[in-house]
Image (tube, rainbow, N blue to C red):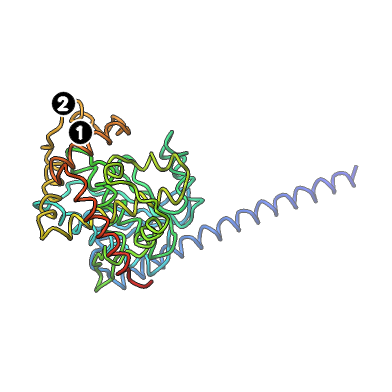
Amino acid sequence: MLRKSTLILIIAIVCLAGRQSDRIEAGEAGAEQQDVRAGMIEYLRQQNPPELKAVEVWNNRYGPGLKLTTAHYEIFTTLLEPSMLRHSSGLIESAYKAYNLQLPEPIETKTKFTIYLFADRRQWEDFTNNFAGEQAAIFRRIKAGAYCHNGVCVAYDIGSERTFSVLAHEGWHQFSSRHFKFRLPSWLDEGVAMLFETQAAGDGTFDFEPAKNAYRLDALKKTMSKDKMLPLRKLIATTPGDVLATDQTETVLGFYSQSYALIRFLRETGGGERLGDCRRLLADGLRGNWPLDEVSKKIAADRNIPRNILWNHLVSLVLFHEYIGDDYEPVEKEYLAFCRQIVADEPKQ
């Protein structure tokens, strides 16, 4: 009986010691997380990035986090890399100013935009599963990048240059979905978004350099060399959903690179006339003045109605005819010549 009691006592002591050890380890982990966040807050306060208004701890289920507040954004992040945190507020506020430059007059947003920036893909997928509902499976097909859903931008770290690229790209979708009365057709929405993918850092701010977007230019060059260019009529009627359904990476990259080139073509050729046409197209979308039938207007204005392939096809053709022209052949010849020119002038990476 004594031996049995002694054995029970030893087991109890071991279990208590194990539990105490678990508590110590958990406590140490919590203290370490707190130290990392506190250290990063102090670092940012010392660096004092010009666009950063406030920084505080963000308690969440995904990892040690911070909340960064700027004039127009709230950034919730578990990415605690010093340089990226120091520059992120300047990047996104510079992008906000650049988005406004696409409009006839600047817009001052009344409610801050929300961005989630995670340290790795696992955290990003966990958040997406909880946040995106039925759409989560679609977003998880993104191989490396970000998405915008219900007005929220969600990204994860894929290296500083590429992460800032996708943040500025998705930021345009976030901006346009909030402020434009009509949603944009895919070629226009994606084409404009790609204007912000390449940046040069200055003194706490960023300049955007679409002509130096080597990623899109390289994809365009490959598409042209393989004779895979979409005809102009088909390009403007296509959606990312069309090409994603093919599950062919080259086709997807071809659509995006051609849309990027088309927006640059409209902005940079025609002696400024096409730039004016492009600006009118955006301005009328902002104000809800496109010449559409009532059904198309309803779909354009109501974000709760899916932007289906048929709507994108019909509306894209109507808008291109109205604002750019309906004689495709000469425009397409000039567009292809422009594509050949910009890939020949592609900057070295």
Q: Number of numbered discs present?
A: 2
Q: Is residue 45 left or right of residue 62?
A: left
Residue 85 is drawn in which quadrant? bottom left
Question: Considering the numbered disc 1 on the image, is that residue within a helix, a strand or a loop?
Answer: helix
Please state which of residues 41 and 146 is positioned toward the viewer in this rendering: 146
Q: Is residue 66 left or right of residue 179?
A: right
Looking at the image, which residue is at 18% across and 44% down? Answer: 179
Q: Is residue 2 left or right of residue 252?
A: right
Please state which of residues 85 and 28 is positioned toward the viewer in this rendering: 85
Question: Considering the numbered disc 2 on the image, is that residue within a helix, a strand or a loop?
Answer: helix
Q: In this figure, which residue is indicated by the disc labeled 2?
A: 294
Looking at the image, which residue is at 24% across and 74% down? Answer: 203
Residue 313's spot in the image, x, y percent? 27, 35
Amino acid type at image mark 2? Glu
Is 246 situated above or below 48?
A: above
Amino acid type at image mark 1? Ala
Residue 46's spot in the image, x, y percent? 31, 73
Residue 81 is drawn in which quadrant? bottom left
Looking at the image, which residue is at 60% across and 58% down? Answer: 24
Q: Residue furthest top?
A: 295
Q: In this figure, which residue is indicated by the disc labeled 1?
A: 301
Q: Which mark is residue 35?
A: none
The mark closer to the camera, 1 or 2, is: 2
Is 314 situated above or below 124?
A: above
| Mark found first going from the N terminus, 1 or 2 | 2
